[in-house]
Image (spheres, rainbow, N blue to C red):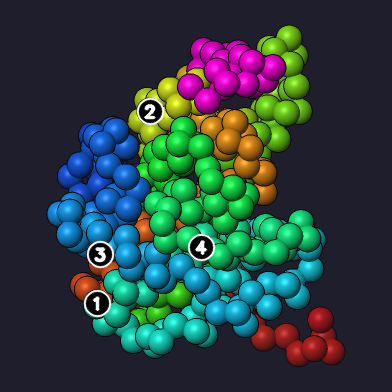
Amino acid sequence: MSELHYRPGLEGIVAGETAISTISDGLRYRGYSIEDLASHAGFEEVAYLILHGALPNAEQLAEFRGRLASGAAVSGHLIDFLRKIPASAGAMDVMRTGASALAHWDPEAGDNSHEANLRKAERLLAQLPTIMAAWHRLRHSQEPVSPDGKFSFAANLLWMLHRAPPKDKFVRAMDVSLTLYAEHEFNASTFTARVVVSTLSDLHSAIAAAIGALKGPLHGGANERVLEVLQQVGSKENAEPWVREALANKVRIMGFGHRVYKAGDPRAAFLKAYCAELAAEKPDDDLEEIAGVIEEIVVGEKGLPPNLDWPSARLYHYMGLPVELYTPLFVVSRVVGWSAHAIEQLDNNRLIRPRSNYTGPGPQAWVAIEDR
Ligand SMILES: CC(C)(COP(=O)(O)OP(=O)(O)OC[C@H]1O[C@@H](n2cnc3c(N)ncnc32)[C@H](O)[C@@H]1OP(=O)(O)O)[C@@H](O)C(=O)NCCC(=O)NCCS
């Protein structure tokens, strides 16, 4: 086995083909730039585009919204099961369990056809926010709020968390955030989903595995760590000494750097404007100023631009969302990309089974146990 094709972390290695998105010239979903999509489309339109391959017309969009609204309720047995999970469980662990448990009530769980997988993907998209919100409320001794089909996807998600009609500004910000998180080529969690279905396993298994991969702080878990860091820094005055000491100690600053975008993450640049807009309504909060100081120094000293998680954490904070939901919010959006990739993999499947370079000992002579 040649070592020529090996790169740690598969950096720079092409591991498959996709027609879903590209990051070669900015980020595009099915050919459309994320800037155009986030400026003009709602999240449902973007989800339809990614899953079904083309933008919906008005009728297709209305039907899609209808399917998401009518599919959002989850079995009462599943809600009862959530009640029994210890309150100390992590929200991402509950999302992983929830994705897996949804399969038990899905009428097509074992059907791996293209059409059934699209229907299951839509149901997962509809139901994962319900699980996220129900768990969050139960954990805080509040009864779950049923999904309400009169709201958009983003508004319903906020409604189920707070049981209050959400502000238009927050709905728009959530819509943009969900759009930017929806899909991102061969990242670790998406690759995980593709590996799982490449064995001809099912969609729910792929999504549960992808959630496990997303949880880590080098991937989706970074958005929660970002807010923890900003709150730990605490004040604008403390920002510069904190970041200089962190860099001197080679601390990884969450929300900066990216395996592929070395010149900057276009999603972060786009979302920054929404942070500024929501922050303007919170004059007592100096998070934007703290973030500005840290960003300037990390970019200036290390040449590391911020990634999407850097502005996302602040955006969710300004919307009053609790930190433990930041990565689950990533899940409820990225399930779209994961599902599209799983379906694309199955449409033209070849088992994903790479090789490794062996680095262990050479051939050993057997030693009986009494002689060791
Ligand atoms: C995303 C990430 C894993 C990509 O890393 P990568 O492509 O493997 O880059 P490397 O780990 O090889 O890092 C290259 C150099 O930049 C440094 N670096 C990378 N990200 C850094 C960060 N966030 N803070 C400080 N230094 C960082 C590394 O320490 C390394 O420095 P060195 O050459 O002096 O050893 C990495 O940037 C990171 O850990 N970021 C923080 C977590 C995060 O925000 N994740 C969300 C990604 S969307």
Cα separation, mark 2 vs mark 4, equals 30 Å
At 67% from the left edge and 44% from the top edge, which residue is drawn?
Answer: 322
Judge by depth and name the residue closer to the eye, 171 or 356.
Answer: 171
Three-letter code for the amino acid on which mark 3 is drawn? Glu
Residue behind mark 4: 147
At 58% from the left edge and 36% from the top edge, which residue is drawn?
Answer: 319
Dot placed on the residue nearer the N-terminal end, 2 or 3: 3
Q: Secondary structure at mark 2?
A: helix
- Magenta segment main secondary structure: helix
The magenta segment is: 277-301
Horizontal placement of 370 versus 208: left or right?
Answer: right
Q: Nearer the viewer, mark 4 or mark 1?
A: 4
Residue behind mark 3: 63
Q: Could you tell me residue 41's position as x and y percent? A: 27, 42
Dot placed on the residue nearer the N-terminal end, 1 or 3: 3
Residue behind mark 1: 114
Determine whether label 1 and label 3 are within 8 Å by CB: no
Q: Is residue 191 visible?
A: no
Cα separation, mark 4 vs mark 1, equals 27 Å
Q: Nearer the viewer, mark 2 or mark 4?
A: 4
Residue behind mark 2: 270
Horizontal placement of 242 versus 10: left or right?
Answer: right
